[in-house]
Image: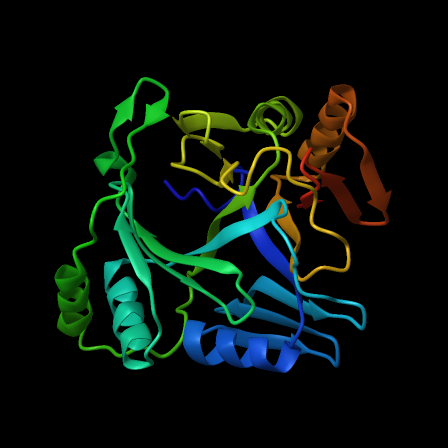
């Protein structure tokens, strides 16, 4: 099962507001391995295998975050297989990049931050048949990752890191929100996702079609935190890719019935979640 193609609703692209465009392009190209698909004076579109996954946008008025806001906890780059994660691990190590790591049972993951503090997860999924479900809840954990096994998988392939491979996708996004109950209501009843895992009153994981999660939500930055200001560096938007225009119209109708304000400008359809995170609905 591929959870990142239609008819599944999945995260397509993440947009970041950045302070230093040149340095961020360098980092995402040299350290993460993105290819630059398009570059202008104030923006760059990055991707893998020709597929756009990340947009960096700089502006005259962008300022650093000065307190805890809602917004990005991390975006997660999903690699096609284990050897690719092993190659990434060796590449990051060889470049002296500090990382964290976890085995989540459903996946193996590496964690780091970009030069402006945006969180990044890079991971590979285990086969869905290997995931355990407790009723409607997928079983996940935070166990130590088998780093030696990852390195072995990379070395056995005889390949070295040459950037993100074709088949890399934006696996999921994990957000800081201000109110978990309101966020759950919006994502379930407004956007149509289902809750597949929860961590007490601290975090929720939501998915379409029984993925382990396309969206994570947490209140670890504090309950009642304000939305990220328009001129503050950090998450600008993320996209949800819907099956077709009919599905998009039905989702817009559902969001309006829910009470959300949907902005439509030409082909651009935007809505904000209750914490102020901007979502673009694309097809």
Q: Is residue 50 above or below residue 41?
A: above
Toward the right, the furthest residue is 265
Q: Residue at x 20, y 69 (%)?
A: 154
Q: Quadrant of residue 54?
A: bottom right
Judge from the rendering whether residue 257 lies leftward or rightward of residue 53; answer left or right: right
Q: Is residue 161 above or below residue 125?
A: below
Q: Is residue 171 above or below residue 21?
A: above
Observer-nearest of 13 and 250: 13
Judge from the rendering whether residue 267 lies leftward or rightward of residue 100; answer left or right: right
Judge from the rendering whether residue 183 lies leftward or rightward of residue 251; answer left or right: left
Q: Residue at x 77, y 20 (%)?
A: 257
Picture coordinates of residue 21 (x, y %)? 65, 77
Picture coordinates of residue 65 (x, y %)? 65, 59
- Colour approach in the figure: rainbow
Toward the top, the furthest residue is 135
Picture coordinates of residue 42 (x, y %)? 74, 76
Observer-nearest of 7 and 191: 191
Q: Residue at x 69, y 50 (%)?
A: 228
Q: Residue at x 30, y 76 (%)?
A: 91
Toward the front, the furthest residue is 67
Q: Is residue 101 above or below residue 7?
A: below
Q: Image quadrant for the N terminus?
A: top left
């Amino acid at each position: 099962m591929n959870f990142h193609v239609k008819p599944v609703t999945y995260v397509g692209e993440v947009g970041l507001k950045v302070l230093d465009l040149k340095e961020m392009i360098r980092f995402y190209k040299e350290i993460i391995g993105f290819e630059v698909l398009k570059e202008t004076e104030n923006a760059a579109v990055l991707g893998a295998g020709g597929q756009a996954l990340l947009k960096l946008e700089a502006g005259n008025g962008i300022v650093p975050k000065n307190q805890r806001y809602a917004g990005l906890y991390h975006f997660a780059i999903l690699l096609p297989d284990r050897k690719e994660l092993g190659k990434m691990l060796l590449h990051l190590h060889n470049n002296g990049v500090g990382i964290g790591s976890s085995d989540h049972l459903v996946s193996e993951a590496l964690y780091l931050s970009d030069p402006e503090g945006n969180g990044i997860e890079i991971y590979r999924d285990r086969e869905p048949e290997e995931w355990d479900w407790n009723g409607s809840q997928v079983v996940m954990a935070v166990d130590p990752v088998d780093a030696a096994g990852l390195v072995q998988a990379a070395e056995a392939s005889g390949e070295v890191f040459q950037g993100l491979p074709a088949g890399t996708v934006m696996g999921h996004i994990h957000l800081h929100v201000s109110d978990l109950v309101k966020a759950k209501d919006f994502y379930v009843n407004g956007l149509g996702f289902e809750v597949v895992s929860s961590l007490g009153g601290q975090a929720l994981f939501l998915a379409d079609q029984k993925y382990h999660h396309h969206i994570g939500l947490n209140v670890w930055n504090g309950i009642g935190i304000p939305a990220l200001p328009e001129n503050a560096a950090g998450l600008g938007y993320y996209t949800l890719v819907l099956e077709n225009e009919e599905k998009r119209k039905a989702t817009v109708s559902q969001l309006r019935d829910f009470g959300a304000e949907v902005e439509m400008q030409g082909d651009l359809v935007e809505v904000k979640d209750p914490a102020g995170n901007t979502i673009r609905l694309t097809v």
